Image (cartoon, helix red, strand yellow):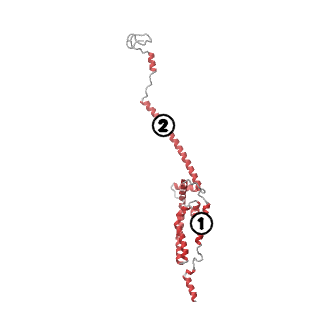
Amino acid sequence: MFCTKCGKELPDGSAFCTNCGAKIVSEFSNGQAQKSDPPQPETASTTESHRVSKTQDGIQFSQQQTAEQSAASASNTGSEETNSETVVQQIIGKNAEYYLTQFVRMRQGAKSKINWASFFLGIGHASYRNVWREWLKAVRLPLILSIGLQVLGILLLQIQFILGIIVECLSIPVSIWFWVAALLLSKRFNQIYMRHVEDKVARHDLKPDPSIGRAILTWFVSWIAYMLLNALPVRNRYPPESCRWHRHKQSSARRS
């Protein structure tokens, strides 16, 4: 081996040059030094590639998590819709399929169809469906006027026959008004009932609406009111004494 500074030949394994005193670094030491070199720092491109990889992994994990959350949300939504439909069916009871179909149509923007049961059965059907308050509110004005004119006409017939007839004749168009209001109510009945059911669901009132007992009670009360109305003096409802021709006949008989 030779000294790298002065070039003097030295014995193998020498640590210092015997001529100039320089420190000798052997090839073996160089090899060890090379092997023990510290790791090179990461370059900017390597760091960027790691960041991109981590970012892609994060995006992939986020997408997977979002997909799982969406699936869970869809599952929860589906279960909520199923539960809601079950609750509505429980409230409606009989003919739930018909009313659910009408509710879906109206939510989609379609007009409410006429409910003929509401038109022909009147307050009895409304009581059966537990919307008798809405029924009375819709027809209250013509109903009150019709009953009032009939009672007033019966009372006036005892005093002024002609005036009583006029008042009872006025009750006819009011009665027609009542039936028109009932027809319009039957056209809006499904919409009214949908709001009623939605309100019960919001109040967590799951009691079924149909009640035959309530309907019978309502019809019974209506029948009692009708009988009381006709309990007014019927025999003297059209008293002949109030007619001019009858008074004239009586006076002619007295003269003869």
Of the numbered discs 1 and 2, the one sitting upstream in the chain is 2
Amino acid identity at mark 1: Val
Instruction: Please give the residue where the numbered disc 1 appears in the rendered image.
Output: 221
Rendered location of residue 161, percent (x, y):
54, 78
Depicted 37 relative to depicted 199: above or below: above
Instruction: Please give the residue where the numbered disc 2 appears in the rendered image.
Output: 58
Q: Residue placed at 59% from the left, 66% from the top?
A: 221
From the viewer's side, name the closer residue of 4 and 216.
216
Rendered location of residue 50, percent (x, y):
46, 32
Amino acid identity at mark 2: Gly
Depicted 180 relative to depicted 99: above or below: below
Q: How many marks?
A: 2
- SS at mark 1 in the image: helix
Q: Residue placed at 42% from the left, 30% from the top?
A: 45
- SS at mark 2 in the image: helix
Q: Residue placed at 47% from the left, 34% from the top?
A: 54
Rendered location of residue 62, percent (x, y):
49, 39
Q: Residue placed at 60% from the left, 62% from the top?
A: 215
Depicted 40 relative to depicted 85: above or below: above
Pick the quarter of the image with the C terminus.
bottom right
Using the rendered view, name the quadrant where residue 158 is placed.
bottom right
